[in-house]
Structures are given as C-alpha cells and as structure tokens.
Image: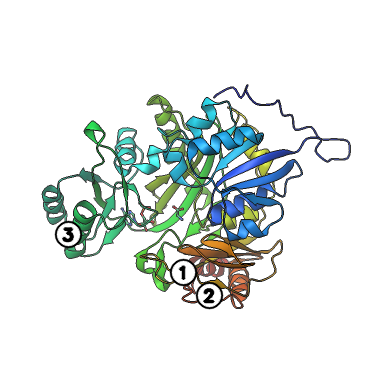
Amino acid sequence: MPPYENQPKIQLLQSRHGASEFRMNVLVIGGGGREHAMAWKLAQSDKVQMVYVAPGNGGTALDKRLQNIPLSDVVALREWAQANKIGLTVVGPEGPLAAGVVDEFRAHGLRIFGPTKAAAQLESSKAFSKAFMQRHGIPTAAYEAFTDPVAAHAYVQRMGAPIVVKADGLAAGKGVVVAMSLDEAHSAIDFMLLDNTLGVVHNAGVGGQAVPRVVIEEFLEGEEASFMVMCDGRDVVALATSQDHKRLLDDDQGPNTGGMGAYSPALVVTPQVHARAMREIILPTLKGMEQDGIPYTGFLYAGLMIDPQGQVKTLEFNCRMGDPETQPILMRLKTDFLDVMWAATEAGGLENMELDWDRRTALGVVLAAYGYPGTPRKGDAIVGLPVENESCMVFHAGTEPFDGTTRTSGGRVLCVTALSENPRAARQAAYDAIQGIRFDGMQYRTDIGHRAVKQALEAKPAK
Ligand code: AMP
Ligand code: GLY
C-alpha cells in the first residue's frame, strides 16, 4: 500500500463529547444513483466537512451537504483534490478505475479507495477475467474468446443454444446476450464483432490497437445474487447481500439493462452459500491477483449464479459496487461509512471491522427514461418527488438541475428506495413513494423483489 505522506496528517480523534475534532472533505467520483447513495451516506458522518461529487447529478445538487464538481478527467480530478485538501476519495463507476484514477491519485500521495487500472481488468475485460478464473480454478461457466466472426459462428453452431455471447469491453451492462436460439447467438456475434452498435469500449490487442472481441460461454441456470466485498490489500470484509433485476420488463423479460431494481438482503444467499462464495470465489480471487502481481484493493463484486444444490459459479466480476444494489445496501448500513472507507484504505485496516446492518429489508425501484436501454431521451421535466426520510430515499442518477427544477439527463433516472420490516412491506413502501413521481416516458418494473417476497412467505411456518 502506498504511504500517504504528501497529505496533511489526519487523525480521527473523538472529543469527550463524541463529536469529531477534525472534519475532512471527501470526494466521490461519479454521477449515478450509486454515487448519490455513497455521498448521502458519507455526509451522515460527523467526521465529514463536505462531500464533493464529481460530476454528481440533479439529486446531489439538491442536497446542501453535497457539492457537485463538474470534472471527470482523471488528471483534472487529482489536481482538484490536491488543491482542495481532499482527505479521502471514493470511486463509484468502472470508467475512471479503468482509466487509472487510483494509480494517478496514489502516485501523488492521495488517499483513494479502488483498484488500480491493472486490477480493474477483472471487470473491464471479460477475456482477462475468464482466463484469470480458469487459471486459478475459480468456478465459472466454460467459455472461449474470439476476434474472428467465422470461428465464433462455427463455435456457436457446434455448441448449440442456449448460449451466452458477451462483448469484451465496458458496455454499461448491455454487452451480454443470453441467446435462447442459434439465430440470436449468430446475430449477437455479428453486431458485437462487425457493427459495434453497442458503443462498447474495446480493449487493446497486440500492438495496442483496440479489437472487438467476444466471449462465448455456457448457459448457466439458477438464481443470481450480487456478492460484494471490500478489500484493503490484506483483509476483506463482505457487504450485505443483494439481488438485482437485470431485464427491462416484468417477469425478467426484455433486454438486459444496467439494473432495474434491487433489494437487500438476498435470501438466496444462505449462510452456506455465503461461506462458499467467500471460500471458492472471493479468497482465491484475491490470492490469485496477489500471485499474478496485481494486488487487489477496492470493492469487488462477484455476480453469482446459485444452482438448486447451492453450488456457486461466477457470472462476472465488477471492480466497484453495483448500481442499483448500492442504494438498498447503504440504506441498511448502520456503521459510519467514513470510518469504513478510511479503514479500507490502509492495508489491514479492515481486520477488525465489523459492519452493522439494519436487519430490515431495503428495496429500490429504478425509474428509467423513455427509450432506455437503447437510446434514452433526455430533457423531460420530473415532478412529484416525495419528501425523503430515513426509510425512504430517492437516489438520483440520470437527472440534472434545470431552471430551479430537475429534468432527466440519462437512461436510469431515479432509484426510489425504501426500508421496511420485510420484503413485502419494503416493496409496498417503494411503490407507494413512486405514485406521485412523473416524467414523460417513465418506465419501471412493477415486480421488483418478487423472489424475496415469495421466499419470505415460504420461510414462514404455516399457521
Ligand atoms: P454479466 O454482465 O456477465 O453479468 O451478464 C449480464 C447478465 O446476463 C447476468 O446477470 C445474467 O443474467 C446473464 N448471464 C450472463 N452470463 C450468463 C451465463 N453464463 N448463463 C446464464 N445467464 C448469464
Ligand atoms: N447492477 C449490476 C451492476 O452494477 O453491474
């Protein structure tokens, strides 16, 4: 871990009155719902002076404890952080991580939580992460990677459907086609390798040239869950479990999206599944990265597929927290988030960290813009935002301030998140809060949390 020597010495001393004697400025990089939730949680710490969010959104603009900074370039962010005496930086999305923001900040002695550019390849390259998992014996679907469409088509023809075709590069959750027929698989290969209509950021191949590449893998059956941990370079702490809803429409129909809603905890992650995920996936991954000379720090998110026997396979790695999973997860976090993040930026800092979670369920429903996930329309006026409180928050994502109002500016617009006694009550509270919210073309799923509601009912003894 880097020594943070160029930075003013910051000690988090508690006074006799319990209040912090030192308050620091923190920076959250990103502008989605996840970053709104992170900033909101950090701002609750009595050790925080101001939370800056770069670039932020219409929701972070409305909160007096947060301030938006219109920057996204990695070097500009680092210079700004130095000039503004930022004590700690937290990175939300994969883009800045893959662009090396952690390397840049650390090279200048700034404290930042996240993986280096090299470690972020676990997410930014499917080919890298699949080869890594194979090399280190981490359970995942069998696969092959292709740059040549002819070979890819032949492989699909040989393997048959269903089969999964993934673009190798960052695609905001949209570069995966679960093909139920051979026709779908063939056309996915064509649009990923030949047309590139997804706007995937391709990884460089031999000679540094960006080459379209696809990973084609075995179709796995089971129930998915999002399993996230924090790694300080030596120790690891698991966050609360959660489940996302990736498809656009009810009953898991329609195209894949970045996520249309999520809840925490995910009942499918039983204590046995949890132990298995740690033992078979997370710990071997951290050890494997260390062995490969790319030690991992930051959030690590394993997308799990859990089969009916409780066997766990890795669908994907993300080198960040999930969006929208972060919104319900952080609503349940009772530990001071600044303390957690501070500890996580010291090797071994997480050794004795116990995270305290609200035992209730948090559930978030995403309200998306007209045209999402294809070409979302921007500029629609948003009205009827409910009054927020400890048990119901509206986290903004694709929103911006406009003439004293708020309007849409991206695909996933809001995530209405409620905390309540059980999955059914949390779902009811979230959907009740949505009732007053309006913008033209608003789309959302009406069944977020359906599995949890069913599982919670089944878990109850019959009366
Ligand atoms: P990924 O971005 O790799 O997590 O894929 C996005 C979504 O596609 C996942 O959340 C799954 O719903 C689905 N998916 C990905 N890989 C597979 C697979 N091998 N078998 C079945 N479904 C998959
Ligand atoms: N919600 C899925 C993700 O953040 O990748």
What percent of the width, then of the height, locates residue 175?
A: 32, 55
Pick out the residue farthest to the right.
16
* Front residue of 185 and 38: 38
Q: Residues within 10 Å of mark 1 (few under 14, many from 20)?
A: many
Residue 457 lies in quadrant: bottom right
Give the structural element (helix, strand or loop) at label 3. helix
- Disc 1 vs disc 3: Cβ atoms closer than 8 Å? no
According to the image, label 2 marks what residue?
Answer: 439
Give the structural element (helix, strand or loop) at label 1. loop
Q: Quadrant of ligand 1?
A: bottom left
- Please report the residue visible at 49 percent of the width from the left and 63 percent of the height from the top: 409
According to the image, label 1 marks what residue?
Answer: 369
* Front residue of 429 and 272: 429
User: Which numbered disc covers residue 187?
Assistant: none
Say left or right for 92 vs 16. left
- The kind of residue tagged 2 is Phe
According to the image, label 3 marks what residue?
Answer: 186
